[in-house]
Image (cartoon, rainbow, N blue to C red):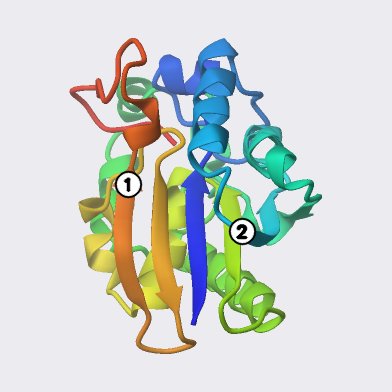
Amino acid sequence: MIKLYLARHGETDGNAQQWYQGSTDMPLNRRGIEQANCLSEFLKDVPFAAVYSSTLSRAKKTAEIVAAPHGLPVETHKELMEINFGLWEGHTYKEITEQWPGEIEAFYDSNGTMPAHGGESFAQVKERAGKKTRELLAGHHDGDAVLIAAHGATIRCILFDLLGLDLTRIWCFQQYNTAFNIIEYYGEKNVMTLMNCTNHLEGMTGYQAQWEDMDSL
């Protein structure tokens, strides 16, 4: 069994402003770096064999901060990038519904099959990110602990792939900034032992404070 840690990146200004980032390369803001440092301290005693991340800087920087106490390099892969939201990127949910009436509602009602306007579908992200995750884990041995730093939608898609879940329920899983999940990976019949854990952020200003509306990606 390989123990897989899947961690979302720290906060960006795009998260704070509640707009859809997707494939747009936004850096961590000051709070995001603080969150990543808290995650790094919390996981410092986990004997990671490797740390991987998306090529987007918000995930890569989060991974580098977590990897630092272990003296590990961060290996990046484009397949772990966030979903491409196309023309919706840089806009809030309200702006999207006003500029492209009915589109985002259809996107969420499509059971993961409809691409964003000029972008990707959840099914496409599940295919690329799930495949890459399995390829990476195939290079590890029984007993290894591995960390992947990625993005809200990407992590959901990886979880649904590894757990054999239906994309119609993808929004049932929340992923907060720097939350981590643990999967016991056997190849098939994998087991989730922890989901959306933010214990490392306890005591921070705004700990677990969430938006009332849909979470941005």
**Residue under circle 1?**
196
**Alpha-carbon span between mark 2 and mark 1:** 21 Å
Residue 56 placement (x, y as % from top left): 69, 40
Residue 208 placement (x, y as % from top left): 26, 25
Examine the image and state in which quarter residue 28 appears.
top right
**Residue under circle 2?**
47
Examine the image and state in which quarter residue 103 appears.
top left
Residue 80 placement (x, y as % from top left): 62, 56
The C terminus - image quarter: top left
Q: Residue at x 27, y 73 (%)?
A: 166
Q: Secondary structure at mark 1?
A: strand
Which amino acid, mark 1?
Asn
Residue 207 placement (x, y as % from top left): 29, 20
Which amino acid, mark 2?
Pro
Q: Residues within 10 Å of mark 1 (few under 14, many from 20)?
A: some
Q: Residue at x 21, y 26 (%)?
A: 213
- Whether residue 117 is visible, yes or no, is no
- Whether residue 57 is visible, yes or no, is yes
The one of 22 and 162 positioned closer to us in this rendering: 162
Q: Extreme bottom residue here?
A: 188
Q: Secondary structure at mark 2?
A: loop
> Which circle's residue, 2 or 1, is located before the other in the chain?
2
